[in-house]
Image (cartoon, coloured by chain):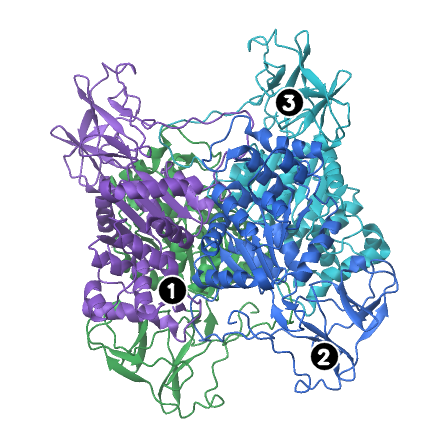
Chain colours: A purple, B blue, C green, D cyan
Amino acid sequence: MTIMPEYVPPDFESLGLAKAPIIETQSAPDDGVVPANYHGTSNHPEYLHMGNGKWRLVPESRMDAVIVISGDNPEVVEARRVRKGDQIVVGRTENGEEGIYVHINGFEQPSQAVDKFSFRTRGTRETPFSRCYDDLYRVLRHDREHGHIVWVLGPAVAFDKDSRDAMQGLIANGYCHGLLAGNALATHDLEAALYQTGLGQDIYSQTLKPNGHYNHLDIINEVRRRGSISKTISELSLNDGIIYACEKHSIPYVLAGSIRDDGPLPEVISDVYQAQDAMREHARKATTVVALATQLHSIAFGNMVPSYHVMPDASVRPVFFYIVDMTEFSADKLANRGSAQAVAILTNAQDFTVNLWNNLKG
Amino acid sequence: MTIMPEYVPPDFESLGLAKAPIIETQSAPDDGVVPANYHGTSNHPEYLHMGNGKWRLVPESRMDAVIVISGDNPEVVEARRVRKGDQIVVGRTENGEEGIYVHINGFEQPSQAVDKFSFRTRGTRETPFSRCYDDLYRVLRHDREHGHIVWVLGPAVAFDKDSRDAMQGLIANGYCHGLLAGNALATHDLEAALYQTGLGQDIYSQTLKPNGHYNHLDIINEVRRRGSISKTISELSLNDGIIYACEKHSIPYVLAGSIRDDGPLPEVISDVYQAQDAMREHARKATTVVALATQLHSIAFGNMVPSYHVMPDASVRPVFFYIVDMTEFSADKLANRGSAQAVAILTNAQDFTVNLWNNLKG
Amino acid sequence: MTIMPEYVPPDFESLGLAKAPIIETQSAPDDGVVPANYHGTSNHPEYLHMGNGKWRLVPESRMDAVIVISGDNPEVVEARRVRKGDQIVVGRTENGEEGIYVHINGFEQPSQAVDKFSFRTRGTRETPFSRCYDDLYRVLRHDREHGHIVWVLGPAVAFDKDSRDAMQGLIANGYCHGLLAGNALATHDLEAALYQTGLGQDIYSQTLKPNGHYNHLDIINEVRRRGSISKTISELSLNDGIIYACEKHSIPYVLAGSIRDDGPLPEVISDVYQAQDAMREHARKATTVVALATQLHSIAFGNMVPSYHVMPDASVRPVFFYIVDMTEFSADKLANRGSAQAVAILTNAQDFTVNLWNNLKG
Amino acid sequence: MTIMPEYVPPDFESLGLAKAPIIETQSAPDDGVVPANYHGTSNHPEYLHMGNGKWRLVPESRMDAVIVISGDNPEVVEARRVRKGDQIVVGRTENGEEGIYVHINGFEQPSQAVDKFSFRTRGTRETPFSRCYDDLYRVLRHDREHGHIVWVLGPAVAFDKDSRDAMQGLIANGYCHGLLAGNALATHDLEAALYQTGLGQDIYSQTLKPNGHYNHLDIINEVRRRGSISKTISELSLNDGIIYACEKHSIPYVLAGSIRDDGPLPEVISDVYQAQDAMREHARKATTVVALATQLHSIAFGNMVPSYHVMPDASVRPVFFYIVDMTEFSADKLANRGSAQAVAILTNAQDFTVNLWNNLKG
């Protein structure tokens, strides 16, 4: 399939690494503490020389973690989850000289003209996005059956009727295998289901409703009184929206707590590192990520997602990461925090969601 | 039709203005110079007391101009176009005490809740735009037959294949009665027609073409050599795009010069005040304005457009003004320059254009 | 002192509220659940009619909380902290008809011209900020001795040498009584103290250091190994920066966890609602808040800060809230989340901090 | 001096270009039209092989122009200024194979780490700007005596009292040899001199003055009545501001017309291509450019400025180009239009100007 670029693993012979050293490890000195010379992982494919010319691709990597070797198995673990005595890979070179090889050009790339002078070398809101959309439509159609599509949503998607309907449609039709968000997205979406408002503003007409500033508190109180979102949906006969669609179609969602939360809803994970662990479960499985209108969650999840995924048949494919935001700053910041491979589509998340659904619902 | 709010003219009796003074005028002291106490116009409906309780609605107003009385007729004229001896309305009150009444609430407005505390009182990218789109679809369908729709375009629309196609479709199907832009929009659109690039970047795939930085200069040279856009379209068999559609369907367009221009194309008006005069022709006729991705042209045209239009049957309707941009700053700046009635849709102009065409083409 | 506007409490007689009903309460049905008709608080001064014409100003209010009456004392409490059986004020009017009066114009305001047409009605980056700075200098000088100044910091302040030095100077000289931030600010600031980098980039020269992406992980590991920031500062002889200044001058700081965190540092509060509680302690005391370059923390703290503060002598003064950010969107979003009284200064947090220190250090 | 990097011309021998072809020329077929294979210039140093191994550095280049050879002299000319029969250099290679060599790495650059994975590879508002400021201070001190400093100003600088004062100070003290702006900057600055307002808003207190929307029209009318800015300054005894400083210290300024202009002031050049010619005079002389808060003028001037300047002693130095704006988009757009060498400082133009003056006035 043309959307899936071929992966070319490193040829260690021709790289002159046939006789590279074997990786070294040291013991973690304490729980949550790593040896001084630990090797920090990136989101790129990394290979470890296990001996005898056998290089092992580290699965499910992420940036800013360490590699624990248990038996013959490398596992990528956040330093805070390391236990005293764990064997941690050490070494800070990336070219194989310590047995660690970081492979950054595994996927074929179309070559670009490199004139000494040219225009439009930077992606901005003026970049043409037609093909990005078409690629994304193809990817989503493919991964609906053959991948794990993760959506990372800011609250703006729930503030608008059409985009909320579109997101509901996408979930109901198999284009979402996991949803990551915060208390606000869920609250505003449930507020819309009950009152057709977001923070008191009508999600269609923009009208501010009288005493509308109570609406989000009221829905939170309704849910807290009942103890769960699913029970509230059932008892209040809510029947539309993003969370409703997840519940109905048994799509797992992670609601991570933040200091901005009202409530919170009972399902929100109040400990942010437990929330990270829950998000990481999706990061390990993700084949496509669509992150909309949230810098916090986009960067958080970007930190945990590898740029590649090892399929059950051991083939390697890219993880497609789309960031949709209104500003170059958000896309640049994601790149500055290490997710340089993310494809930015600079537009309003409302239009983006509607576009996707218009195309995919057919 | 529900999209067209009713206009309620001022009731001068109940305003206590039955015996208001008649307007005064003074002679312009020189060409392009106005008397010190001149009355400066706004974009709102303004009424002049002509005597005997007869109040006259000034037609085709604009902000920051003056009113010249010739015979019984008030005309709104930019100060630079005043001629020595013209009779200029003087007086700086707006409540009738000098015979000038500015009428700011002529069109019915839905009333809003006014709680002492509320959220979401400011329009931002998170505002729901579903209804804005629906309203705009209705307005465009109505004004296609019964109005004068003016598009004000920045170059971004021509940089993307889908949005350029959409804009072509809108023009070809009657949704544009006048197009205002600069040399860049026309140049990049013609570049796309000839090379499928914008400043050397493929308008579909984002690829930078080898030596692509010549493309816009080459198309300019082609047009300059032939002396006109229409001749170039014909001789080079160009057959798509925004300018092509205007030429084919005889939609008038104004290309205003700017200091950023390469070339320019022969049709570009190099004197900016002559360009203003050409734009003002469309401002006088406009019933709906859609301004996309250009601060310069949006504010320029916003300055000249009244907020109301007097129809041939003397009825008064609003002029709908939509500003589409990526930033709150652009919408705020338009308001800060006086066009406070403009409806802002904060999104990428590419998606916006595609949305419109998807809805209206059916 | 001219910077401190006089507070005029409501005159309940002239408001016709002499015989207003007394407030009603209902019992909380469960822990963390409030009765259906609970009164939700705003950040404005709110008065409760306790009977016999005695109206009580609710102290230390915040938005989106409830009022618990214990004995004669109203306390503003987040719904999640309500205990079963607590007596909760009910009623959703704000004009006294249920014994609750929200007072939004207690502080004198300079009156503004209200022409029917005017420019520049919205605050943007083009708004003149000279007086805002001068006012803020005066406020900070005053509150250094007579108030509680809270800084809310995004990581950008630690990324630049001059602004980091400036912030250190402000803290060391008494202009900060509490600092609220996240793991990132503290980590990057400590990284700068040890390596002169922020995420591997030199904080003066912008140079990316070789293997610099290890620096923040290394400093985190150093702190985690030792168990505390203060011990690390001592053992590594760190002697500059924001956190160093807080530690040296015993300024309390709250580091709230987020899902973007690496590490975290041991002092970070991983449960976001515990973090809210810690922040709320400062919100109750705050007289001036300066929030820089962080939407998350600014809105979070904005939610908890009253717009007024009751001094020990029972006089009422405003809480000054300054939001410093690069975009109108951030300022608008803060207002859309209820903190409409915040003064926005639209600029880079680096320059802002340097400006303050240049002026105040003298 | 350490701020001035050394220029290393190409070594044509070692490049294997000792026997490169001599440049070719063709006649311009008409006024304002160039031969099909014309060579388009960049802002980089370009060398032409004139024969016998003699390579000539084209002086005062700019992007998107052509090279006219008269006698032995290459001159860089905009296509619109070409006359029929002019000898135009042809060829579109840049490596010498047609006698044209574009030299992009003439100035020494500090080398950067190139890890396979790193953070902060893109410049944003979070980039540390301390050193940029320090470099700029040094450059301005140097070029005050030994260069030609050009300021490109948007109107925001005149909207704020402190920044307007700062700009006045910089001009009065030799830090400006030419000022480029539009009608708005000059109008608002003169409005401030007469009324202490900008578009009716007090430049210190932010207060909107009653009928303040007349102020800019009134000052324009005052100037138009008298026929010149200088006469108006004298007769109205204006004695502060940016334009006042230019007039007093005989600093040339170019006011380029735009379609947004009211008035205009008599000094404004209404034909944009004549305005370009006037701006180009400064581009030819410029050694440092500081462009503030104007996308239109910044990009326009960026198009015309070479990245290098040939000094009277034939040495070659860089032209420093600083772009100061609030958004990454503006900096990226400047780069996307070819001025990739510009140094972006992302902040408010008000603070920037104040910073400069605080440092340089001492």
**Marks 2 and 1: which is nearer the front?**
2
Instruction: Identify the mark at residue C303; answer none if there is no mark.
Output: 1
**Marks 3 and 1: which is nearer the front?**
3
Q: Residues within 10 Å of mark 2 (few under 14, many from 20)?
A: many
Q: Which residue is mark 2?
A: B96
Q: Which residue is mark 3?
A: D37
Cα distance between the residues tagged 3 and 1? 64 Å
Kindly identify the amino acid type of the residue bearing the numbered disc 1.
Asn
Q: Residue at x 11, y 29 (%)?
A: A71
> Circle 1 marks a residue in which chain?
C
Kindly identify the amino acid type of the residue bearing the numbered disc 2.
Gly
- Which quadrant is the N terminus of chain A positioned in? top left
Give D23 or B243, whichever is nearer the viewer: B243
Residue at mark 2 shares a chain with residue at mark 1? no
Q: Is residue A320 among what the camera can see?
A: yes
Determine the image quadrant of residue C93: bottom left
> Circle 3 marks a residue in which chain?
D
Give D331 or C10, whichever is nearer the viewer: D331
Residue at mark 2 shares a chain with residue at mark 3? no
Q: Position of residue B260 (x, y in %)?
A: 65, 40
Residue at mark 3 shares a chain with residue at mark 1? no
Kindly identify the amino acid type of the residue bearing the numbered disc 3.
Asn
Q: Secondary structure at mark 1?
A: helix
Q: Say if A323 sits above or below B232 in the image.
A: below
